[in-house]
Amino acid sequence: MQPRRPPAPALLLSLWLLLSLAVRAAAREHPDVPARPPAAVGLPRGILQLAARAALHFFNFRAGSPSALRVLAGVQEGRAWVDPQEGCEVNLVFSTERYNPEEEAEGRLGKCSARVFFKNQKPRPAINVTCTGLTEKMKRQERDYLLYKQVKQLRSPLDIVSIPDSHGHIDPSLRPIWDLAFLGSSYVMWEKTTQFLHYYLAQLTSVKQLKADDDGIDFDFTVLLHEFSTQEIIPCRIHLFWYPGKPLKVQYHCQELQSPEEASGMEEASAMVPTELSNF
């Protein structure tokens, strides 16, 4: 028996051409199916942590409850994709803990999954976040109403120099004011966050309690926000109106060199805590 001859070069070339034509034809038949954006390249280090904090700022603001405030404990997993024309998308899972360390350990930890989309370098990322391990609704309402009564009983005008003080201490009697300032600042920090800039509440420098037309709490705050990448300290004036179980209303203006629409804003949000929050 004679050995099999290897395929002629002409035959191999014909097979390669047929395969190339088939691939091109398939691409023409499905022009609307986009390829997955490439894995993020050139993004700042810590993009997953930045996205998680942005999601929590959004969550805290939309929850509208000082008793539901959460901060980042750690990122479990995540991935980022970048599209030069559209922006950066981040999908991640992270753990949270209660913001107020004086609350009991029950329900202290939680878990969230989020999709965060940064529109190039524009602020106010689009966020879809789902969290578990939250405080029970009845307990949250009880704590919010207790905080509401504590604030209503404070003397007016409030004589506050700064919270925390120069030693980083927050007087327990002023904790409700700080928590309300953190709640209002959450909206400001979410709206100002980009894929390169993220903020944290550094200090509350002044508080003015206003006379509300109804039973709500009406405050003017001046806060200092710390921007991490530039290390800038940005003063912002925040007007907050809050009543337990009702929508949170926030207006603000920050002193910085940028366009007016980025330097100020106004928003109203639900005061309930759903299992899923979205602004897509």
Image (cartoon, helix red, strand yellow):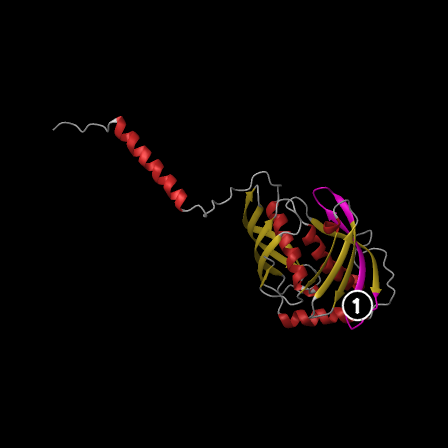
Q: Main secondary structure of the magenta part?
A: strand
Left or right of 30? Residue 218 is right
| Residue range highlighted in magenta | 210-234
The quarter in which the C terminus is drawn is: bottom right
| Amino acid type, mark 1 | Val
Q: Classify residue 26 by image quadrant.
A: top left
Would you place residue 98 above or below residue 78 in this image? below
Q: Say if residue 24 shows up in the picture.
A: yes
Residue occupying the point 70% across, 50% down: 192
Indicate the secondary structure of the residue bearing disc 1: helix
Q: Classify residue 245 by image quadrant.
A: bottom right
- Does residue 224 belong to the magenta stretch? yes
Left or right of 18? Residue 86 is right
Is 179 or 26 nearer to us in this picture? Answer: 26
Query: Looking at the picture, how far across and down is residue 78, in whole percent?
Result: 54, 49
Task: Read off the residue under disc 1.
Answer: 151
Left or right of 213? Residue 269 is left
Query: Looking at the picture, how far across and down is residue 121, in whole percent?
Result: 64, 44
Would you place residue 121 above or below residue 138 in this image? above
- Does residue 258 belong to the magenta stretch? no
Query: Looking at the picture, how far across and down is residue 74, in whole percent?
Result: 60, 52
Left or right of 134? Residue 254 is right
Query: Looking at the picture, how far across and down is residue 259, in whole percent?
Result: 74, 47
Q: Classify residue 107 by image quadrant.
A: bottom right
Q: Residue furthest left?
A: 1
Residue occupying the point 66% across, 60% down: 60
Would you place residue 268 above or below residue 39 in this image? below
Residue occupying the point 85% across, 59% down: 160
The quarter in which the N terminus is drawn is: top left
